[in-house]
Image (cartoon, grey):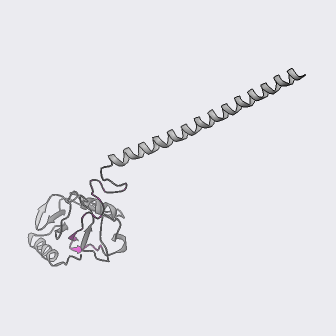
Amino acid sequence: MGKKARKEREEKRESFAAKRTYQKRKSMLMTAGVLGIILVIVGYSSYNFVTMQGSVPGAPPGAGLLNDEHAHTSILVRIFGDKFDFTSPAFQIKSSWIHFEGQDGDTIHRHSTGVTLGYLFGTLSLTVDDECFVFPDGRQFCNNDDYSIKFFINHEQVPSIHDYIGNENDRVLISYGNESPEEIEKQLLELDNQSIRK
């Protein structure tokens, strides 16, 4: 019985050692797998961070860093001679990048390089292009045989302001209707007399 008992004990020891070795190997492989996954995630995140080149999720296309610049532009919008009112809460601070603020509807505050007026109007749910001025409720004021939309930047007529980046103290007029040159001059004079709040 001594030989048989010894043999059984040796087999139990070998079986126990084999189980222990298997468990250690399994634990090490799982740890290596988890570390591998973490390294892949960190590597991917690092690659994305490096290749973003300054862009921030949710930033306007082509914008610099938020608060890398602060410019103020005066704007006047006249539709059939009536002044469009940007003082309503519906048009105040809809984006940190460019907005109206402080119940002032005359001054655009741009807080980053590269942010266009087209982006501003998009944040306000307005469409302003070389053909139409479209309100959030769907009302449209489009070019036709009798009326047209006109854009002026610092008294100079331009075909569109969609891609325009307003500079400090610029003055922008959007006029829709059938105004005479004299009426446009009156609107430009009104724009010149608007104060730019900083």
Query: Where in the figure is residue 52, as x and y percent of width and height?
Result: 33, 49
Q: Is residue 90 left or right of residue 168?
A: right
Question: Which residue appears at 29% of the width and 72% of the height?
Answer: 86
Q: Nearer the viewer, residue 96 or 164?
A: 96
Q: Vertically, is 179 above or below 47? A: below
Name the quadrant containing residue 71. Answer: bottom left
Total labels drawn = 0
For the C terminus, the quadrant is bottom left
Name the quadrant containing residue 151. Answer: bottom left
For the N terminus, the quadrant is top right
Q: Is residue 96 left or right of residue 153?
A: right
Query: Where in the figure is residue 89, as x and y percent of width and height?
Result: 36, 74
Residues drawn in magenta:
57-86
Tell me, yes or no, if residue 79 can be seen here. no
Q: Nearer the viewer, residue 169 or 144?
A: 169
Query: Where in the figure is residue 20, as x and y percent of width and height?
Result: 69, 33
Magenta stretch containing residue 68, yes or no? yes
Question: Which residue appears at 34% of the width and 69% of the height?
Answer: 93
* Residue at far left of view: 182
Q: Is residue 47 left or right of residue 144?
A: right
Query: Where in the figure is residue 182, as x and y percent of width and height?
Result: 9, 73
